[in-house]
Image (tube, grey):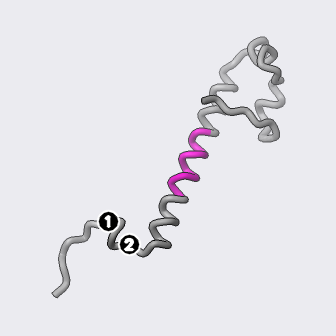
Amino acid sequence: MHSSNSTISARNMRPGLFLAMVTAAQWLARKINERRNCNALMELSDEQLKDIGLSRGQTESDVHVYSRY
């Protein structure tokens, strides 16, 4: 007989599927963090950006590498 329990656990999944889910979750977390950083930069005034060595144009492009921890 088949069990009616539809709960998914790491033990019941194939290793490749579990790894894909973990990788997708990490990617999503990274994108959320990048968006949070971008939003924080956009809230700064031009004078504040100048203090940290950025221009408004740099904050609107993905060329610079800036990370807030």
Indicate left or right for 48 with 19 as reference: right
Q: Position of residue 49 (x, y in %)?
A: 77, 18
Q: Quadrant of residue 36?
A: top right
Q: Quadrant of residue 39?
A: top right
Question: Of residues 15 and 60, which is closer to you in this image?
Answer: 15
Indicate left or right for 46 with 6 as reference: right
For the residue marked with disc 2, what is the amino acid?
Met
Quadrant showing the C terminus: top right
Q: CA distance from mark 1 to mark 2?
A: 7 Å
Q: Are marks 1 and 2 in contact (CB under 8 Å)?
A: yes
Mark 1 is surrounded, within 10 Å at the Cα level, by few (under 14), some (14 to 19) or many (20 or more) other residues, namely: few
Q: Position of residue 24 (x, y in %)?
A: 54, 58
Quadrant showing the N terminus: bottom left
**Label 2 belongs to which residue?**
13
User: Farthest residue in the left direction?
Assistant: 1
Residue 28 magenta-highlighted? yes
Q: Position of residue 2 (x, y in %)?
A: 19, 84
Dominant SS type (magenta): helix
For the residue marked with disc 1, what is the amino acid?
Ser
Residue depicted at x 33% and y 69%: 11
Q: Position of residue 57 (x, y in %)?
A: 83, 29
The magenta region covers 24-33
**Label 1 belongs to which residue?**
9
Q: Quadrant of residue 23?
A: bottom right
Mark 2 is surrounded, within 10 Å at the Cα level, by few (under 14), some (14 to 19) or many (20 or more) other residues, namely: few
Residue depicted at x 78% and y 14%: 51
Rendered position, 6 above or below 65? below
* Secondary structure under the numbered disc 2 in the rendered image: loop
Indicate left or right for 47 with 31 as reference: right
Rendered position, 51 above or below 16? above
